[in-house]
Image (cartoon, helix red, strand yellow):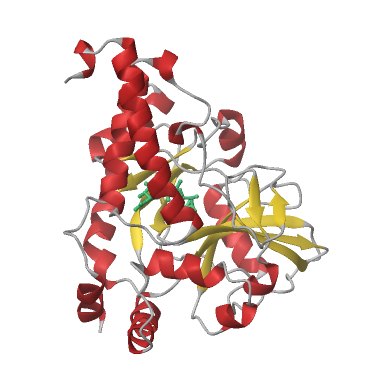
């Protein structure tokens, strides 16, 4: 049945059924790092819920997956409140939708201000807190407001500096990921040991990081790309691309494949380039993120309860269903 023929009650029932399904999948994915369906299946059901809630805004509930970030934190970890929430990203699935996003911001055909194009790293979001240049706390995104304290685990990752080049107090955010080759190696070991393999590098990274014993994490080959900060007070950068340069100077690893785009054509070319290059990268990406480059403009655009208004993720079309076995054959 199309939305237009539904009564409000039918829409509310359909939305509840979708939420139940999405919440179960989210629990498997975020809480237990063990998804039972492909991301594209989740994304499709999520989009149905978005459309339904758009047609019947009165049926939106505050606990709807469209209104919240991530999911529960695991018991066993100390909880870390995020003073500045860690958000998700709005997503689009076509260049036309990407253009519509830019047009909405600019109200014009041409992109009036610059965007920074970045790869969307398929890992999990982390936040690192430094006091006077020293790493004091590291956490997961959790539900965006409260994450899990994984400081000891993060300290085992070589790309994360324990000490910055300047003694500043700052909270830096980015992505922790497992390179494809490490994922293949880890799954081969797990199969030899008779342990269930991880479904994909993202889940392998999350499962490796959210360990109560940091020695387990230390044996997993994890890396990071940092791309954001909770506040800019102690930084000089006034653009997103400048922020990446400054983060690098501070000692962080940033993804070098970013690019400032001045027009929609340049954004389009960037998307095309990395759609082609995606399989050759040493780590998984599931899309492209475009961000308004000016940091003051980012701040004035602000965010909804779930996503910033100054950025959007273009998600790659789903690959054919990838089994773990195929992943191993494909990367070795
Ligand atoms: P998301 O992963 O689609 O996008 C937001 C995240 O992108 C950010 O939080 C950040 O961690 C990450 N990111 C990577 N590179 C970035 C960059 N350069 N700049 C900014 N952020 C960057 O959103 P989400 O809320 O984390 O997760 C939703 C997605 O998770 C769904 O679209 C779905 O694909 C997947 N999911 C799958 C299942 C399943 O059962 N398979 C269940 C729940 C969610």
* Residue 250: image location, x then y, percent: 67, 67
Q: Nearer the viewer, residue 266 or 207?
A: 207
Above or below, 118 relative to 132: above
**Left or right, residue 110 beside residue 157:** left
- Quadrant where the C terminus is found in the figure: bottom left
Look at 22% across and 76% down and name the residue there: 325
The residue at 45%/36% (across/down) is 65
Residue sitting nearer the eye, 184 or 160: 184
| Residue pictured at 43% horizontal, 48% vertical | 26
How far across and down, in percent of the image, does residue 293 sit? 50, 43
The quadrant in which the N terminus is found is: top left
Q: Residue at x 40, y 75 (%)?
A: 179
Residue closest to the eye, 103 or 43: 43
Q: Is residue 98 left or right of residue 325?
A: right
227 or 26, nearer to the observer:
26
Q: Is residue 49 visible?
A: yes
Q: How many marks?
A: 0
Q: Quadrant of residue 133?
A: bottom right
Q: Is residue 247 above or below residue 295?
A: below
Residue 238 location (% of width, % of height):
62, 45
Q: Is residue 97 left or right of residue 35?
A: left
Please state if 2 lies on the left or on the right of 120 as rendered: left
Instruction: Provide residue 80's location: percent of width, then percent of height.
Output: 71, 53
In the rendered image, the vertical position of residue 10 relative to residue 331, given as above or below: above
């Amino acid at each position: 049945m199309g939305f237009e023929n539904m009564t409000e009650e039918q829409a509310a029932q359909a939305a509840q059924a979708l939420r139940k399904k999405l919440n179960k999948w989210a629990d498997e994915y975020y809480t237990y790092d063990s998804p039972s369906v492909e991301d594209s299946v989740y994304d499709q059901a999520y989009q149905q819920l978005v459309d339904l809630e758009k047609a019947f805004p009165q049926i939106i509930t505050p606990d709807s997956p469209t209104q919240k970030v991530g999911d529960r934190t695991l018991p066993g970890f100390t909880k870390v409140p995020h003073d500045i929430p860690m958000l998700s990203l709005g997503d689009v699935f076509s260049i036309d939708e990407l253009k519509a996003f830019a047009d909405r911001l600019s109200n014009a055909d041409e992109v009036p201000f610059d965007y920074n194009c970045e790869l969307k790293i398929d890992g999990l979001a982390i936040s690192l807190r430094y006091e006077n240049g020293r790493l004091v706390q590291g956490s997961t995104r959790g539900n965006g407001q409260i994450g899990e304290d994984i400081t000891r685990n993060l300290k085992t990752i070589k790309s994360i500096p324990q000490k910055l080049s300047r003694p500043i107090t700052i909270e830096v955010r980015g992505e922790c990921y497992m390179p494809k080759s490490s994922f293949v190696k880890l799954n081969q070991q797990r199969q030899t040991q008779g342990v269930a393999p991880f479904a994909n590098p993202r889940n392998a990274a999350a499962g490796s990081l959210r360990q109560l014993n940091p020695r387990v994490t230390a044996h997993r080959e994890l890396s990071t790309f940092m791309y954001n900060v909770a506040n800019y007070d102690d930084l000089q950068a006034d653009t997103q691309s400048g922020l990446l340069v400054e983060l690098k100077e501070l000692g962080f690893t940033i993804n070098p494949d970013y690019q400032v785009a001045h027009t929609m054509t340049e954004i389009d070319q960037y998307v095309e380039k990395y759609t082609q290059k995606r399989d050759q990268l040493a780590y998984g990406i599931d899309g492209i993120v475009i961000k308004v480059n000016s940091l003051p403009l980012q701040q004035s655009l602000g965010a909804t309860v779930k996503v910033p208004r100054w950025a959007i993720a273009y998600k790659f079309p789903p690959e054919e269903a990838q089994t773990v076995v195929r992943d191993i054959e494909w990367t070795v």
